Image: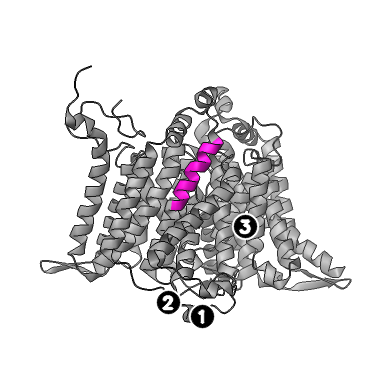
């Protein structure tokens, strides 16, 4: 019983992390049809920043990581994606693939292939015992952080004019432009928010591992992208739910599959993904068929 | 109807002959430049065959596939298992299914079987995956690559234990033979362009709705293209196994997918000439960068670039191409005999119609 609870909390936290990462991808996709594979390198940049600046104190390190992530995200948009507005989603995906590969090699050149380590927020790495159930502080913190960010994002998207503009653009970019929503502003905004979410993902994953290498963000991004697509990348809530589902499933499989089978946990998740795509190519949360725009 | 000149009749053939000549000439030049460059040229030809496989499917159907390296991987595995000495297999790969210890095949048979296994995998997954379009197709094929990589990494019943690699693949493939296989593959790809499935797929690529209205059921046609390109990718895998002679699942994953896609985009996704020009130009740039990384004497100077700069330049080439010339170096056109008046549109083979 306690083992079940423990694995549930872990799975919730893994789901929350991937949900945030998928949301970072989904926000941008909603606006410009870009499934940004290089989101992983934004996460890596945030993680490196945390590792290198943690000794200055969390109140410096965390804002600094957010700034770096947001700036890198905006830089990608300005230097590459803003020049590719006419491209198809598939071409944009290939371009982001190239950008991801490029940044990984740049990190390798700058920080070597070895992992950089620092005890980032090591207080969170402890576990506490509640009624015989050992629970990782970090898992609880991750779930709380995700809840906080999602509430904030929800308030922003529904209560502020800028947020409503973004929401409208994500729902239907063409119509949004027709009614006078400034395109460049909402696109920039989506990249900036994506950067903030990536920084949050960087924080929880860096606390968890304490070590960052050039390809740190890649596995998270693969699963998040896959999750966003099966949830319905066309819709912000779809991306979030899909990311959560994939994170939750992966963590549960890791906890409950016997040792010799748990090596294959990613293979099971990918097969699940293919199955979902076949049954609902438009995404789990998208009703009807018309929602997929290409 | 006026009698057409012989040159005109042979016009379409030029789009094949020119490609064969280019590959032959580049190989010939490189074979004279020393041992190290010969080895790189062999890898370049293996990559070229993978890119041709990608073009046969992506270029013809317009559907993105990140999954072809999965066929490369199973092809490589097949050739590895069939060519390693049985005694060695028993010692190095102890967990394998017993029947795999004794199966053996000459290398050429093994490469052909590798192609068939790649094609078989494509036929099995094709009917499912080929129903998807656009981004969904990209993600689903990527998931296929993920599944295959995991299985080959961890399933020690069909290969090495995780973290170990398959060694002992015989050294039988020289540059000349590699080139011959490559030329045969180019002929196959050129012929494939002219088949009915390829023609129907091009129609559906240009206008899916009009194609459906004309009675084209696109899914079976895509499965055929997926399977044929899967065979070619499997053969490329076999060539890789015999060239590299050490196999590890991690070599046949995301990075190879990225590099071969970059080659295809560089040359032009829509044409076979694009696949070949892209692969050769990319490999040429790579060759120069490798030389530069180790330092090149120009007169009294030694020109060199820092270690690790090579992949950065290659990635910049891909991104720059996507930004400034998204249709690639060839613009998606095939090579046309210089004196012909009518050139086909980008994305179409040269014909006499």
Identify the mark at residue B168; answer none if there is no mark. Answer: 2
Q: Can residue B73 be found in the magenta stretch?
A: no
Classify 10 Å Cα crowding around label 3: few (below 14), some (14-19), many (20 and above). Answer: many
Q: Which residue is mark 3?
A: A201
* Residue A288 to residue B330: above or below: above
> What's the distance in space between the residues labelled 3 and 2, CA to CA?
43 Å
Q: Quadrant of residue B313?
A: bottom left
Q: x%, y% of residue B152?
A: 55, 65
Q: Which residues are magenta?
A: B219-231
Q: x%, y% of residue B186?
A: 33, 48
Classify 10 Å Cα crowding around label 2: few (below 14), some (14-19), many (20 and above). Answer: some
Which residue of the protein is positioned furthest toward the left in this rendering? B299
Name the side, left or right, on which B274 lies relative to A41.
left
Compare marks 2 and 1 and give the one earlier in the sequence.
1
Classify 10 Å Cα crowding around label 1: few (below 14), some (14-19), many (20 and above). Answer: some
SS category of the residue bearing label 1: helix
Q: Which residue is mark 1?
A: B92
Residues A143 and B50: in front is B50
Identify the mark at residue A164; answer none if there is no mark. Answer: none
* Residue A14 to residue A114: above or below: above
**Is the Cβ of the residue at disc 2 closer than 8 Å to that at disc 1?**
yes
Residues A7 and B197: in front is B197
Quadrant of the drawing holding the C terminus of chain B: top left
Of all chains, the one bearing label 3 is: A
The residue at 31%/61% (across/down) is: B178
Query: Is disc 1 on the same chain as disc 3?
Result: no
Main SS, magenta region, reads: helix
Q: Can residue B224 be found in the magenta stretch?
A: yes
């Amino acid at each position: 019983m306690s083992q079940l609870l423990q694995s549930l909390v872990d799975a919730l936290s893994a789901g929350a992390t991937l949900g945030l990462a998928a949301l970072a991808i989904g926000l941008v996709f909603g606006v410009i049809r870009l499934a940004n594979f290089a989101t992983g390198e934004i996460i890596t940049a945030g993680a490196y920043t945390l590792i290198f600046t943690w000794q200055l104190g969390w109140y410096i390190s965390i804002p600094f990581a957010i700034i770096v992530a947001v700036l890198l995200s905006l830089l990608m948009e300005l230097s590459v994606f803003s020049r590719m507005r006419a491209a198809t989603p598939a071409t944009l995906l290939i371009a982001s693939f190239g950008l991801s590969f490029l940044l990984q090699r740049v990190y390798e050149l700058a920080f070597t292939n070895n992992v950089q380590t620092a005890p980032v927020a090591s207080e969170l790495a402890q576990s506490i015992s509640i009624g015989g159930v050992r629970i990782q502080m970090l898992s609880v913190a991750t779930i709380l952080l995700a809840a906080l960010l999602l509430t904030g994002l929800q308030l922003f998207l529904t209560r502020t004019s800028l947020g409503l503009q973004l929401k409208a653009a994500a729902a239907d970019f063409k119509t949004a432009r027709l009614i006078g929503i400034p395109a460049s502003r909402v696109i920039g905004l989506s990249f900036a928010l994506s950067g903030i979410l990536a920084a949050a993902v960087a924080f929880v994953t860096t606390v968890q591992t304490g070590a960052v290498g050039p390809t740190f963000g890649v596995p998270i991004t693969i699963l998040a992208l896959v999750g966003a697509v099966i949830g319905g990348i066309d819709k912000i809530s779809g991306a979030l739910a899909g990311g959560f589902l994939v994170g939750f499933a992966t963590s549960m499989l890791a906890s409950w599959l016997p040792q010799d089978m748990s090596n294959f946990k990613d293979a099971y998740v990918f097969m699940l993904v293919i199955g979902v795509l076949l049954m609902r190519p438009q995404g789990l949360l998208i009703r009807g068929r018309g929602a997929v725009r290409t | 109807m006026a009698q057409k000149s012989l040159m005109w009749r042979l016009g379409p053939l030029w789009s094949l002959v020119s490609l064969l000549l280019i590959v032959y000439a580049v190989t010939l030049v490189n074979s004279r430049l020393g041992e190290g460059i010969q080895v790189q040229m062999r890898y370049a030809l293996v990559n070229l065959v993978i890119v041709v496989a990608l073009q046969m499917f992506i270029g013809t159907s317009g559907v993105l596939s990140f999954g072809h390296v999965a066929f490369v991987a199973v092809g490589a595995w097949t050739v590895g298992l069939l060519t390693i000495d049985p005694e060695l297999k028993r010692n190095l790969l102890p967990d394998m299914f017993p029947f795999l210890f004794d199966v053996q095949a000459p290398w050429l048979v093994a490469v052909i079987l590798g192609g068939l296994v790649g094609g078989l995998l494509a036929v099995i997954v094709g009917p499912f995956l080929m129903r998807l379009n656009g981004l969904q197709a990209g993600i689903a094929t990527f998931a296929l690559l993920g599944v295959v990589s995991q299985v080959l990494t961890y399933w020690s019943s069909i290969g090495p234990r995780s973290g170990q690699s398959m060694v002992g693949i015989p050294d039988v493939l020289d540059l000349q033979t590699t080139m011959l296989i490559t030329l045969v593959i180019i002929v196959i790809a050129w012929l494939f362009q002219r088949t009915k499935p390829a023609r129907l797929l091009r129609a559906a690529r240009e206008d899916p709705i009009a194609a459906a209205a004309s009675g084209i059921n696109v899914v079976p046609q895509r499965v055929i293209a997926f399977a044929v390109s899967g065979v070619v990718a499997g053969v490329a895998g076999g060539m890789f196994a015999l060239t590299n002679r050490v196999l590890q699942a991690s070599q046949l994953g995301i990075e190879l997918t990225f590099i071969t896609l970059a080659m295809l985009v560089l040359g032009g996704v829509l044409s076979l000439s694009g696949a070949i020009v892209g692969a050769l130009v990319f490999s040429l740039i790579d060759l120069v960068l490798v030389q530069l990384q180790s330092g090149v004497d120009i007169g009294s100077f030694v020109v060199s670039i820092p270690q690790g700069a090579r992949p950065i330049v290659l990635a910049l080439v891909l991104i720059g191409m996507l930004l400034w010339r998204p249709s690639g170096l060839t613009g998606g056109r095939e090579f046309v005999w210089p004196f012909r008046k009518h050139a086909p549109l980008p994305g179409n083979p040269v014909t006499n119609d």
